Image (cartoon, helix red, strand yellow):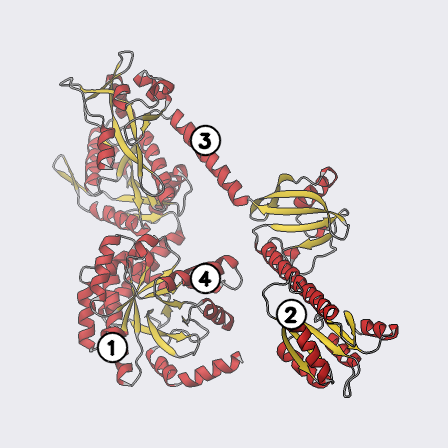
Amino acid sequence: MLLSGLTNTVYKILIIDDNIQNIFMLEDILSPLGNIFFSESGTNALALVDKIKPDVILLDIEMPDMDGWEVCRALKANPLFSDIPIIFITGHTEPEFERLALESGGVDFITKPFNASICCLRVHTQLKFRQQNQLIIKAKEELQQLVNQVPMLITYWDDLGQNLFSNDNTGLWFDSLIGDVKNKHISTIFPEALSNAILNHHRHITSDALKYIVTVPQSVGLSFYEVFQSKMKSSAGVDGYLVTVVDVSEVKHAKQALYSEKERLRVTLNSIGDAVIATDTRGLITFMNPIAERMTGWRLKDALHQKIEDVMHLKDSDTQQPLLNPLYLALREQRIVAMALNSLLTSRGGHVFYVEDSAAPIRNENGEMIGAIMVFHDVSEAMAMAMKMSHLANHDQLTDLPNRILLQDRLSVACSTARSYGTKAAALLIDIDHFKFLNDSLGHQYGDELICMMARRLRSLIPASYTLARLGGDEFVILMSETRSVEASSQLASTLVEAMHEPFVLDNQKFNVSISIGVSVFPNDAVDAEELMRHADVAMYRAKQEGRNRFCFFSHDLESSLMERHHLETRLRKALINDELFVHYQPKIDLQTNIIIGAEALVRLANDEGELISPAEFIPLAEESGLIIMLGKQVLNKACAEAKRWLEMGHTIPISVNVAAAQFADPDLAGMIKKALLDHNLPAHLLELEITETALMIDAADMQNKLSELISLGIKIAIDDFGTGYSSLAYLKKFNVDVMKIDMSFVKDMLNNKHDYEIVKTIISLGKSMGLVLIAEGVETKEQSHALVELGCFMGQGYLFSRPLNSTDFEAFISQSSKCVKGINSVDE
């Protein structure tokens, strides 16, 4: 019965008494309650308490070295033992002794001779109290941990708005919550809009939680917080208000964006001139826009869940035979399918339309086909006539080239497309030099003939995708749409000027004609089509002012940039031809031991004055100009030669070489690497290729084959700058790579930006789960190094250890590595 109410925990009971007979007697009485420990002196007991950490202590008052009062005060003064219950045992029955025992910190008092039943009950009671206290403490700790981990801000305020509790003291929600905010007013802790809303609701709050949303202006836009506010009374009897805050900004913004997108789509589909019909994968109609309703004669409510062929009757205009709706072909082949020519659509009311357009499958976010959409429009005789009239209205009568009206439309489309896809559009305004003199001298008939000959020559010099238009008189415009570089417009303008050196022959006479060209590029020096043309006109007159027979760009800065790019390309070509490129090496370090475990080869190029040119300038140029493969080959050979030399010096240091997307796509890449390894007699395991994740995602299947071919050579493969692209994990896990490099953009701010820290943490976790070696780039501080090690990344490179070094300095770094390691460790200490 004495043991009821206690758990199965084995309790430790310490008896401190200088009389061994008392100890034996108490041991016999209390042994059912737990393990018995004893000490015959107070001094020894203090040491024993630290060792066994008893659950209850029975302490004799009168002992020779230290009496019970002293032992009790010593235990209560120590925070580690102050919560252990102490029961005094003595032969004294005077009330004074019991008072002193309680004042010293005792919880109970047992008199001698011992009554076994009473003694056991008193100890049992204290053990039960201790068990309950420990459960309460544990419950509080678990509750506190739970409160701290819930994704909401939990606060408690008194009736005056003074803070009584907050589960955030780190500033996770608001900077003003950092540290102790107890007793601070809500207006000094929460943003103004949030604190005002909570205070205004105080007088309406009951024990039932009131829920509302508060909009808070922030520097980066609006934030939305869902607030739950209720009145409650604390255990201390204090009336207050429990306020929990949940950040619903992301959900709110997503809902707003979704609504806007749905509304935009609804308005678009109801406003466009094409008929639109959507179906599920079985061809059952799920949507029709108003144009589709008009052309088919069906209302959407009647057509829903009907087969599309029952609503959209198609037949061949020549054979009058029914046609298979192209939507079924799009569903079957899962591609965009154009409608057959000469298709007739017969509406429910018998009206016939010539229609054409296309059908396409609809996919969900997982790429799974969930239906198809049919888009078609009327191209009957009236439309054909309208198109003919449109051609006459939009083309020059003399040359049949697009006129100013059509050009303006194409300029607008080109600018819009360039803006959407991040490309460029260029307008070249061409004016014939001294044309008025020629026209007056030869007569208008020959002048018109010269204009037509000029149009034909210009047309022959440009791709079919470019627009050549005549503005009137002797002015032409060439529109270059969706071009990738400004240099393309420069090359075309130069070609046009040179082509005019060939004389024109009129009435068996040769006439030398030159042109002046003004070039304007969108978006570099124009924000819209109108400004693009205006700036081209300004540039053309500047070309005339500078002597004619030439071209000029609107922007002097742009012209200067093109010249600089030309000089840089010339310098790069010269360096490649004369083998003037050189390579620097940045060491890779074991973050735990500071030992060199590898090096990355980084190409360098100097200008004519011997000054280094930033790789950010010449590497993209090498890729655009097709020089990257030659550049990569030279870097690979130099790096292999250097790694072999280190090996002969007794240093086994793997070397990593960056491979651009164009190099990786080169079918001869594996052969080139194999030859480099053989030429320099370098073991394959000492070579590592660093490939960006975006290069891997160009064609996942082809990339997997290439990687297998490279790995078969014995080299290692690293994914460089991981986290900056848009790789799919479903594809990534298929690539048999060895190393994952964490991009320096995340490492740089990982200790200052919680998002970057979580990204680094996630990348490391992903890499470890895939069995990859992890290397962090851009390690600049000891704190970053320590944080990476704690997260499980044990390798890194960066300025904390060394900048990229030339061959001589890198060898010195290797030789002095032990000193460097010692120096870094001493700084850490």
Label 1 and label 4: CA atoms lie apart by 37 Å
Name the residue located 31 percent from the left edge and 33 percent from the top edge.
371
Q: Name the residue that disc number 3 marks.
A: 263
Q: Position of residue 623 (x, y in %)?
A: 28, 58
Q: Nearer the viewer, mark 3 or mark 4?
A: 4
Q: Give the residue type that dot 4 points to.
A: Lys
Name the residue located 40 percent from the left edge and 46 percent from the top edge.
525
Given contact means CB atoms under 8 Å apart, are the residues at marks 3 and 2 in contact?
no
Image height of 393 relative to 564, above or below: above
* Dot placed on the residue nearer the N-terminal end, 1 or 4: 1
* Dot placed on the residue nearer the N-terminal end, 2 or 4: 2
Q: Name the residue that disc number 2 marks.
A: 33
Look at the image and tell me in which quarter the N terminus lies.
bottom right
Q: Position of residue 407 (x, y in %)?
A: 32, 33
* Dot placed on the residue nearer the N-terminal end, 3 or 4: 3
Image-quadrant location for residue 146: bottom right
* Dot placed on the residue nearer the N-terminal end, 3 or 1: 3
Label 3 and label 4: CA atoms lie apart by 39 Å
* Label of residue 641 in the image: 1
Q: Nearer the viewer, mark 2 or mark 1?
A: 2
Label 2 and label 1: CA atoms lie apart by 78 Å
Q: Mark 2, residues whose alpha carbon is within 10 Å: few (<14), some, or many (≥20)?
A: many
Query: Can the viewer see residue 362 in this picture?
Result: yes
Q: Name the residue that disc number 4 marks.
A: 761
